[in-house]
Amino acid sequence: MKITHAYAAQDAKSKLAPFEYQPRALRHHDVEIEILYCGVCHSDLHQARNEWRNTIFPVVPGHEIVGRVTAVGGHTQKYNVGDLVGVGCMVDSCRTCPSCQEGLEQYCENGFVGTYNGEDRETKAITYGGYSTSVVVHEDFVLKVPANLDPAGAAPLLCAGITTYSPLHHWGAGPGKKVGVVGLGGLGHMGVKIAHAMGAHVVLFTTSPSKIEDGKRLGADEVVISKDADQMAAHANSFDLIVNTVAAQHDLNPFITLLKRDGTLVLVGAPEHDHPSPQVFNLIFKRRSVAGSLIGGIKETQDMLDFCGKHNIVSDIELINMNQINEAYERMLKSDVKYRFVIDIETLRNASSAA
Ligand code: NAP
Ligand code: ZN
Ligand code: ZN
């Protein structure tokens, strides 16, 4: 089988650089996908730099994949050669535990297999992600991408989209609900678009005054500069739900104070260092909750893609060449992305065939 060309980090301190590997031979239910676009998630950066202390090197990041099916295994039923498909953060799970049976594979009690930095359940080989020319995935973990969506803009839906859609849906964002989104990065801008499309009253919290106009354009009814205590105080006790996408450690209390009685602050940002523990009295006096949420299940991811197809929602992207990835990571660390980098994988294919 042909070699897969990719970009990998060899250790936590190295830049990403060209790498090659032999893909697995197609199993009966596998789908081989020629990757067209791959989004750049802050989780890729956390893992390339071993900030979660569980990275197996070399690591090929990338879990916002859109591509075309180029081959299928003998028993594959869901996909045909030529289909436009997506792959998100998971490529397998045990399928038998209560969470898998409920379609919540991301909470698999035996651990889901990550699209990268995961371990194949059969061979124990380490999985490699979407900064690659192709990927081989079991059909049950492949998604259909609606034909009306721009494929490059759709790639970030596979992680940023589902990670915000899932808590918004679970906690009932919709008409009559006041919903906050903290941080206007990759996840945050999808959260604003999706919460707006669900019909909620959306308030964006940002640390960047330069993002106010964009926040409104993307669907926020109001934008609050979270460092401004007076602006924050004006929203005290008023939110049903706040989804916090911030990728760095910070004080949660100023956001908890904004929740109504029984309101929920959902953490989806996964920083290297934990946030300081919130004040207990700030929770118990209004029966407020602080919760967490992890990506979304496969069925829910398809529902999200169909929802985005119906509402014509894609990510606002900056398309980059594969060899610009290290620069993109530096800009992401400065919150300088509008609002998701997406790698044009054709540039990797071309560079590899020229070499
Ligand atoms: P991103 O594009 O870098 O966006 C993060 C945003 O957070 C920034 O744009 C910035 O927004 C804000 N921010 C950054 N540093 C901050 C600081 N020190 N204080 C306050 N605000 C700050 O990252 P992303 O790709 O959206 O990912 C966000 C986080 O979610 C990452 O930790 C990632 O690993 C995690 N994640 C979790 C899941 C899950 O399943 N739970 C899935 C995917 C990603 P403003 O400029 O508007 O303030
Ligand atoms: Zn991600
Ligand atoms: Zn399971």
Image (cartoon, helix red, strand yellow):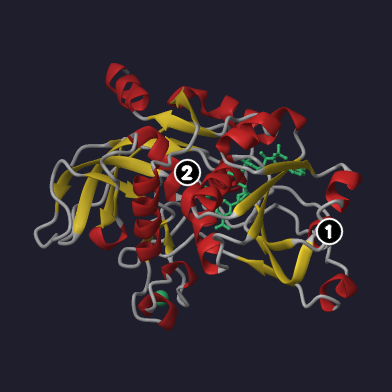
Image vertical order of residue 112 relative to residue 312, above or below? below
Mark 2 neighbour density, 10 Å: few (under 14) some (14–19) many (20 or more): many
* Label drawn at residue 96: none
Residue type indicated by callout 2: Pro
Taking the view exactly as shown, the residue that stands out farthest to the front is 176
Q: Are marks 2 and 1 in contact (CB under 8 Å)?
A: no
Give the quarter of the image for residue 164: bottom right
Q: Is there any visible trace of residue 150 in the rendered image?
A: yes
Residue 350: x and y in percent read: 31, 20
Q: Nearer the viewer, mark 2 or mark 1?
A: 1
Give left or right: position of 101 versus 169.
left
* Residue, disc 2: 61
The CA span between labels 2 and 1 is: 40 Å
Residue 84: x and y in percent read: 24, 42
Give the quarter of the image for residue 283: bottom right
Mark 1 neighbour density, 10 Å: few (under 14) some (14–19) many (20 or more): some
Residue depicted at 69% across the width and 68% down the height? 264
Image vertical order of residue 286 relative to residue 181, above or below? below
Which numbered disc flags the more N-terminal residue, 2 or 1?
Answer: 2
Residue 286: x and y in percent read: 81, 75
Taking the view exactly as shown, the residue that stands out farthest to the bottom is 98
Give left or right: position of 280 versus 294.
right
Residue depicted at 9% across the width and 59% down the height? 74
* Residue, disc 1: 236
Check the picture and name the quadrant holding the N terminus.
Answer: top left
Check the picture and name the quadrant holding the C terminus.
Answer: top left
Give left or right: position of 108 versus 24.
right
Residue depicted at 62% across the width and 31% down the height? 214
